[in-house]
Image (cartoon, grey):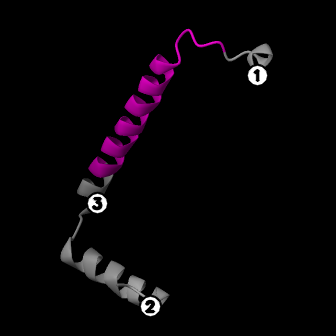
Amino acid sequence: MIQTARDRACLLVALVRAIPISPLWAALLKQVALLCGAVLFVWLLSLTYGLDLSVAFF
């Protein structure tokens, strides 16, 4: 179990060194994350379609 901030930092450094990411892959992962976020947002909007969210409802 990780106890201190130093231990967490060491773990993070080890992970970063173990998985080298080029700038191209970083940009690709960023775009994929943004796309997933947009899809999730639209999905949540579709779930609330027709739901009465007016002030009188609350």
In this picture, which residue range is highlighted in magenta? 28-52
**Could you tell me which residue is drawn at 40 percent across and 41 percent down?**
34
**Could you tell me which residue is drawn at 41 percent across and 24 percent down?**
43
Say above or below: 4 vs 32.
below
Residue that label 2 marks: 6
Quarter containing the N terminus = bottom left
Q: Is residue 58 left or right of residue 7?
A: right
Q: Which of marks 1 and 3 precedes in the sequence?
A: 3
Q: Is residue 22 left or right of residue 31?
A: left
Say above or below: 31 vs 21.
above
Q: Which mark is residue 58?
A: 1
Q: Position of residue 42 (x, y in %)?
A: 44, 24
> Identity of the amino acid at label 2?
Arg
Front residue of 31/3: it is: 3
Query: Does the magenta-highlighted stretch encompass residue 30?
Result: yes
Residue that label 3 marks: 23
Magenta segment, prevailing SS (helix, strand or loop): helix
